Amino acid sequence: MAARLGIATNLHALRHYSATELIAAGVDVRTVAGRLGHGGGGATTLRVYAAWLSESDQRAAASLAARIPGPPRS
């Protein structure tokens, strides 16, 4: 089907994409793991299917920066 549509991919790559995008969107890992048919609480899902995304990293950095207290008031 992918070849017929002119998409250079396969089902396994779409599985990785799906897991990565769901985790990046904030879907909890247990739900993503369940959708992929993984047991064990999501360890396999995180180890194998979740890729690093710069957008997620930027959100993490912004979250930390927002929590850093300002200088003490005198």
Image: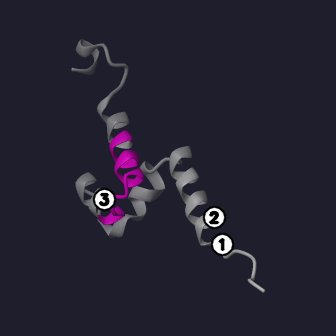
Quadrant containing the N terminus is: top left
Horizontal side, residue 62 vs residue 34: left or right: right
- Among the two numbered marks 3 and 2 on one chain, the one whose residue lies closer to the N terminus: 3
**Image position of 31 with respect to 51: above or below:** below
Q: How many marks can you see?
A: 3
Which residue is under mark 1? 68
| Residue most extreme to the bottom | 74
Whole-angstrom CA distance, mark 3 to mark 1, is 33 Å
Task: Check disc 1: other Cα within 10 Å, few if <14, some if 14-19, many if 20+.
Answer: few
- Whether residues under marks 2 and 1 lie with C-beta atoms below 8 angstroms apart, the answer is yes
Q: Which residues are magenta?
A: 17-30
Give the image location of residue 73, x and y in percent. Answer: 74, 83
Give the image location of residue 4, x and y in percent. Answer: 23, 13
Q: Which residue type carries mark 2?
A: Ala
Q: Is residue 21 magenta?
A: yes
Task: Check disc 3: other Cα within 10 Å, few if <14, some if 14-19, many if 20+.
Answer: many
Q: Secondary structure at mark 1?
A: loop
Q: Main secondary structure of the magenta part?
A: helix
Q: Quadrant of residue 39?
A: bottom left
Which residue is under mark 3? 33
Q: Which residue type carries mark 1?
A: Ile
Q: Is residue 11 magenta?
A: no
Note whether residue 53 is visible.
no
Q: Residue at x 39, y 57 (%)?
A: 45
Q: Residue at x 61, y 58 (%)?
A: 61
**Image position of 65 with respect to 48: above or below:** below
Horizontal side, residue 5 vs residue 54: left or right: left
Whole-angstrom CA distance, mark 3 to mark 2, is 30 Å
Quadrant containing the C terminus is: bottom right
Which residue is under mark 2? 65
